[in-house]
Image: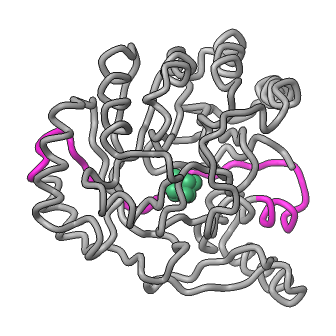
Amino acid sequence: MSCIYGPVPSRRLGLSLGIDVVPRKTCSYDCIYCQLGRVTNKTVKRDIYIPVEPIIREIEDFLGQMNVPVDYITFSGSGEPTLHSQIGLIIGQIKEMTSIPVAVITNGSLLFMDEVKRDLGQADLVVPSLDAVSKTVYETINRPEESLEINRVIQGIVEFRAQFRGQVWIEILYCRGINDDPSEVARMKRVLEKINPHQIQLNTVYRPPAEDFASPVAEERLREIKDIFGPKASVITPYRGNQSFGGKGEVETRIIDALKRRPLTAEDMATILGLHPQEIVKHLKVLLNDKRIRHRLHGRRSFYEVAT
Ligand code: SF4
C-alpha cells in the first residue's frame, strides 16, 4: 500500500499531504475513540517499520507532479509515526526537497525519549495529543502500552516544547464522562500552563470510535472548557470545506484507499475526491453491493468503512 495519501482537506492544516510511516494500527496507545478500531500492534519499540527509500521516492514523485497547492506535508495516518526510528531522516530529506512545511501529528507518548525529540527537531509543527493528566483517566482513555506513565509523558512534552524551534499545538480529545469532569479539566489547565503550547485544540468523537462507549461531549461543554483554558484554546469543528481537486485513478479504488485510512461520510469523500456527492453515492452503492465496504451510523452521521 502507498505510504502517502491525499492531499486531503484537514480541519486544522488546510490541504495536507499525508504520510504513513508505520503499518496500520501500530501504536503505543489503544485509544477508546480511535477511528482505526482497536490497535493490533501495541508497542513502544522504535523500528524501521517501512523502508525509508520507497517513502522518499513516493514523496519525490508526488512533488514532481504536484498539481494542487499543498499547505502541509503531515506525518499521521494509521498509527503512531514516532515509532518509525528513521522519522528524523525522512523529515530531513523532505526539507531538502521542498519548502512545504512539515507537520507531525503524534500521540506524544515517546517524546520523553531524547532521540524522538531530536528526530522531530526539523519539523515545522508538532501536534502532540494529551487527553488526560491523571493516571486512571489516562489509562482509561488511551489504554497505553504497559511501560508508559503519564507523568513521564507530560515531562517529555514539556521538555520538547522548551527546546523545539517550531510550533507546538496540543490536541485534547474529550469523551463524555471519561475525561471531561471539572477536576480533570482543572488539572489539565495546570499542566497546559507548564507546557506552554502555541495553541490548544479541543476535539471530540466526530468519527466512529473503537469502543461504542466513547461518546462525544456536547459542543457547549467543549466551549466551556475552551473558556477555562483561555485564549490559546479553540474548538475543532468537523471539516466542512469545499476545496475540490481532481486526480488520477479509478474512483472506486480511490474510495477504498481513502476508507482504509479512516471511516468517511459520503460528503467527506466528495470533498477529498473532488466529485459531486451524487457521483460518490453511485460508487458507494456498487461497493456496498460487492460487500467491499460497509455502512455505520455514528451520532446522526452516516459513515462508510472498509469491510474486513
Ligand atoms: S487515536 Fe491515535 S494514538 Fe490513539 S490508538 Fe489510534 S492511532 Fe494510536
Residue depicted at x 30% and y 55%: 135
Residue 208 seen in render: no
Residue 43 seen in render: yes
Give the colour scheme shown: one colour
Residue depicted at x 67% and y 43%: 7
Residue range of the region highlighted in magenta in the rendering: 228-257
Q: Quadrant of the C terminus?
A: bottom right
The answer to whether residue 303 is left or right of residue 151 is: right
- For this orientation, the residue located farthest to the front is 147
Residue depicted at x 81% and y 59%: 254
From the top left corner, tell me how far across and down residue 84 is, in percent: 68, 33
Which image quadrant is residue 128 in? top left
**Depth check: 123 or 236 in front?**
123
**Depth check: 31 or 10 in front?**
31
Relative to 162, say whether 148 is above or below: below
Judged by its main secondary structure, the magenta piece is loop
- For this orientation, the residue located farthest to the top is 96
Which image quadrant is residue 271 in? bottom right
The answer to whether residue 92 is left or right of residue 65 is: left
Residue 34 painted magenta? no
From the top left corner, tell me how far across and down residue 87 is, in percent: 66, 26
The answer to whether residue 212 is left or right of residue 293 is: left
**Depth check: 75 or 304 in front?**
75
Which image quadrant is residue 88 in? top right
The answer to whether residue 163 is left or right of residue 284 is: left
Relative to 206, say whether 95 is above or below: above
The quarter of the rendering in which ligand 1 is drawn is: bottom right
